[in-house]
Structure formats: C-alpha cells, structure tokens
Amino acid sequence: MRELVAYIAGSLVDNPDAVQVNEVEKDQTRVLELSVDRKDVGKVIGKQGRTIRAIRAVLGAASVRLKKRVSLEIQE
C-alpha cells in the first residue's frame, strides 16, 4: 500500500524525491501519512479535492482485497 501511494504521488508532483509515506497502525486501521513538498500539496489534493479522493478510492479498492482498513492523510 505504501508503495502504491508513493508511486501515485510521485507521478503527480514536480519534486518526486520529497515524497514520503509513513505507515501507522491505529486501532484496526492502517493510516498512511503522505508528505510532499509544500509547493506540490495542491497538485496532490487537486481541484476541489478530486485527485486525493481518487487516490483514496484506489486505496479503498486495494484494502478490500487485502481485508484491511486503510486511510490516507496528507501531512503539511
């Protein structure tokens, strides 16, 4: 899951070297914390949040297959 988010975010931003994904276990949910360069936050979020919603939808589909709960947070 981490690699998937890193790949997608790295493809969207101008500075792919700054993309970092940390994985944290909270209760029964796996939280992926995405951090990117300050200039690239808007590109990851997209217009009206459409891009981040699409990334979360892909994660949701992958998490169903793995039978795990996964959420994505953007760190600023």
Image (cartoon, rainbow, N blue to C red):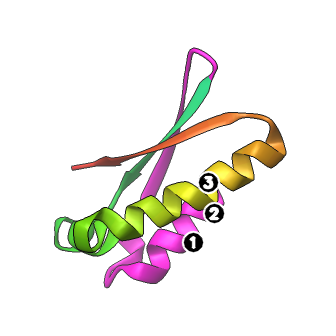
Q: Which amino acid is tagged 2?
A: Leu
Look at label 3 and name its amino acid: Leu
Q: Residue 52 appears in which quarter of the rendering?
A: bottom left
Mark 1 is on which residue type? Tyr
Q: Secondary structure beneath disc 3?
A: helix
The residue located at (55%, 61%) in the rendering is 5
Is residue 1 in sight in this rendering? no
Check disc 2: other Cα within 10 Å, few if <14, some if 14-19, many if 20+.
some
Do tag 2 and tag 3 residues touch (Cβ < 8 Å)?
Answer: yes
Q: Camera-side residue: 31 or 37? A: 31
Q: Position of residue 4 (x, y in %)?
A: 63, 63
Q: Earlier in the sequence, mark 2 or mark 3?
A: 2
Quick one: label 3, few (<14), some, or many (20+) residues within 10 Å?
A: many
Q: Which residue is situated farthest in the top direction here?
A: 27
Q: Residue under circle 2? A: 4
Quadrant housing residue 67: top right
Do residues under tags 1 and 2 come within 8 Å of each other at their CB atoms? yes
The residues bearing labels 1 and 2 have C-alpha atoms spaced at a distance of: 5 Å
Tell me if 14 is positioned left or right of 5 in this view.
Answer: left
Q: Is 6 positioned to the left or the right of 16 in the image? A: right
**Secondary-structure class at tag 2:** helix
Which residue is under mark 3?
59
Where does the magenta region start and end? 1-28
Identify the residue at horizontal 46%, vertical 75% (top origin): 10
Specify whether residue 27 is painted magenta. yes
Q: Is residue 61 above or below residue 9?
A: above
